[in-house]
Amino acid sequence: MTTHRFAPARWYNTLGSHPPALTVDSGDIVVTETIDANGWDKAGSNVMHGPNPMNGPIAVSGAAPGDSLRVDILDMTPIRPTGWTRAALAENVVDPDFVAHLPPRDRATWRIDRNAQTVTLEDAPAAIAGLSFPLAPMIGCLGVAPALGQAISTATSGGHGGNMDYRRLGPGATVWFPVAMPGALFFLGDCHAVQGDGEIVGTGVETCFEVTVRLTVEKRAIVWPRGMAGDDIFTLGNARPLDQALQHATTEMVRWLAEYGLDTLAASHLLGQAVRYDIGNVFDPAYTVACRLDRKWLPKGLDRFTMR
């Protein structure tokens, strides 16, 4: 196992079969620094345009179509003392007749305190003066090159991953992507200091991070991204309308449970009472839904997810 320090010389606004910027072996660790969703780096220089410039692609030796790429998010450290958000809810998350009441979508600045591990709104309205949240790093956009030589915008998402904005994709989480192209061609960027479900203002607190990931090839086929965080496993569906994203995520969870001996009847009983659904993104062209299950509900002897 080798640790690589990857300093990008260029960034991409599409996930696709671009020439690899780095090639690693399965199981290697990569440490890299990201820029924010509009292309501003840690020094405050605009080095790329948006949306969501991606680091990569990183090729993983031996990865072939039909495999899975396991991504362990080992660490995320903010490397800029400020971040930004939009100041108003997105128009598509409120009733149409309420849109006229929304404030301007100006940019708001947030102060990031690495020592205190807090994220605080500057110039906050009086009613929420001093508004502060615990630092909760997450990767908003990550995934692999899609099939057929496609180049898909970092503004959206699909079976290859992409701009899912699922807030559980932070340090300690693992996510698997279906490999469609040789080498997998992994991308990441669009990191947030904190974000609520849905990314309903169109951003998280956008800033720059040093991110450490481990990339491992696994010989099993999946259709949609799968993941594990804390006590939960989850599957991610990306589509619009929202119900289609939920359908993709649920179907992938049933497929996953089948690998551990649960037929569709058993999975139906289990999910019917124990499933939880999270909204990853309802702002961008494709919405994201996570189908989530606490591993404590799995029959004894079937909780082998941490070993895979």
Image (cartoon, rainbow, N blue to C red):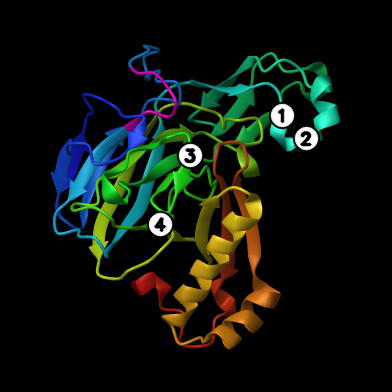
Residue occupying the point 78% across, 22% down = 102
> x%, y% of residue 195?
59, 37
> x%, y% of residue 285?
55, 38
- Distance from label 3 to label 4 (Cα)? 18 Å
Q: Earlier in the sequence, mark 1 or mark 4?
A: 1
Mark 3–mark 4 contact, CB under 8 Å? Answer: no
Mark 1–mark 2 contact, CB under 8 Å? Answer: yes
Under tag 2, what secondary structure?
Answer: loop
Residue occupying the point 42% across, 35% down = 154
Which residue type carries mark 2? Val
- Distance from label 3 to label 2 (Cα)? 21 Å
**Left or right position of 141 against 293:** left
Where residue 175 is drawn, which disc sits there? Answer: 4
Where residue 91 is drawn, which disc sits there? Answer: 1
Q: Nearer the viewer, mark 4 or mark 2?
A: 2
Q: Main secondary structure of the magenta part?
A: loop
Task: Specify the segment rendered in magenta.
Answer: 48-54
- Distance from label 3 to label 1 (Cα)? 18 Å
